[in-house]
Amino acid sequence: MAKLRYAVVQFAEEWKVVSGRSRMGHFATQALALNAGARLAREAMAAGHDVELLVQDWASCLLSYDVLPTASYLDEIQGGSSGPADEGPSQPGTRALEL
């Protein structure tokens, strides 16, 4: 099965989640787009897909984020929790990708 990639990128004055040739959503902020992208990626992982979440930074580089820690972290700072009860919030791991 091919790896699914979700990328959170800026288009003009808005943010979108891109996967393959599809662009999803019109988000006013990167944070809102990241939240949507992390949830889509988590749902794809739950369905058994290998998933990568990429996020555009201030210098237009794409950073790769670990999906589950990122989604759990976003849930935690927004007041909810989808992670295991005994697991505290953790900062998402990143690594820079060459374009």
Image (cartoon, grey):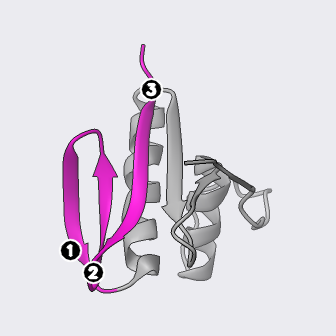
Q: Is residue 85 left or right of residue 82?
A: right
Q: Tell me, for residue 49, which label it has, or none.
A: 3
Identify whether 68 is placed above or below 80.
above
Residue toward you, 86 or 62:
62
Picture quadrant where residue 39 is located: bottom left
Q: Magenta span covers which residues?
A: 1-28
How much space separates mark 1 and mark 3, taking CA atoms?
A: 25 Å
Question: Which element carries disc 2, helix, strand or loop?
Answer: strand
The residue mark sitting in front, 2 or 3, is: 2
- Mark 1 or mark 2: name the one nearer the start of the chain: 2
Provide the major secondary structure of the magenta segment: strand
Identify whether 40 is placed above or below 92.
above
For disc 2, the marked residue is 14
**Residue at the spot 41% in from the left edge and 48% down from the top edge:** 6
Identify whether 85 is placed above or below 34.
above
Query: Pointers 1 and 2 in contact (CB under 8 A)?
Result: yes
- Mark 1 or mark 3: name the one nearer the start of the chain: 1
